[in-house]
Image (tube, rainbow, N blue to C red):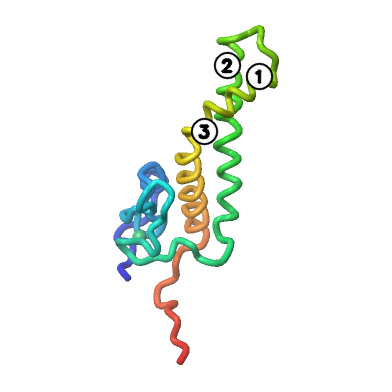
Amino acid sequence: MSMPSTQWTFGRRLRAVAGLRCPECGAGRVFASLWTMNEPCPDCGARFQREQGYFTGAMYFSYGLGIPIIALLTLLVYLARPNWRLWQDVLVAWFLFIPLVPAVFRYSRVMWMHLDHTFDPVIPDQSDTTT
Ligand SMILES: [Zn+2]
């Protein structure tokens, strides 16, 4: 496994999140396809799923991303169709949100990993040496 070549700065962290890159090296692509993650990082070998249920934490980001987007879409539907009822606005907003689900899924996982690795980076030489 290669060590991170440079120190993490806020800007570097933001670029890695925006590019869906590894939270440890900043280079490896986290996703192999729309829904499938690389495991481990193709560049540095860091494991993305650090433990069972690790990505439960990504739900916070999924919520944080999804709710404002749906609220904004609801507002836009309301402005376009002011005589509709609120439940109709929300229903249409949910349908408009569906194409954004993959992006929210991907970014919420990557944001979660970067937050986690900011406070708990991979410690070198932690390899399993049990015999
Ligand atoms: Zn990596």
Q: Which residue is mark 3?
A: 98
The residue sitting at 55% across, 29% down in the picture is 69
Check the image and name the residue furthest to the top: 83
Mark 3 / mark 2, whichever is N-terminal: 2
**Marks 3 and 2, how far apart at CA:** 15 Å
Residue sitting nearer the eye, 19 or 25: 19
Which type of secondary structure does the marked residue at label 2 adopt? helix
Asked if marks 2 and 1 touch (Cβ < 8 Å), the reply is: yes
Quadrant, the C terminus: bottom left
Mark 3 or 2, closer to the camera: 3
The residue sitting at 55% across, 16% down in the picture is 76
- The amino acid on which the numbered mark 1 sits, given as a three-letter code, is Gln
Q: Is residue 25 left or right of residue 86?
A: left
Quadrant, the N terminus: bottom left
- The amino acid on which the numbered mark 2 sits, given as a three-letter code, is Val
Mark 2 or 1, closer to the camera: 1
Mark 2 / mark 1, whichever is N-terminal: 2
The residue sitting at 63% across, 25% down in the picture is 91
Horizontal and vertical percent position of residue 11:
38, 43
Mark 2 Cα within 10 Å, few/some/many (few <14, many 20+)?
many
Q: Which residue is mark 1?
A: 88
Q: Which residue is mark 2?
A: 77
* Beta carbon of the mark 3 residue lies under 8 A of ligand 1: no
**Marks 2 and 1, how far apart at CA:** 9 Å
Mark 3 Cα within 10 Å, few/some/many (few <14, many 20+)?
few
- The amino acid on which the numbered mark 3 sits, given as a three-letter code, is Ile
The residue sitting at 46% across, 50% down in the picture is 110
Which type of secondary structure does the marked residue at label 3 adopt? helix
Which type of secondary structure does the marked residue at label 1 adopt? helix
Rendered image: mark on residue 54: none
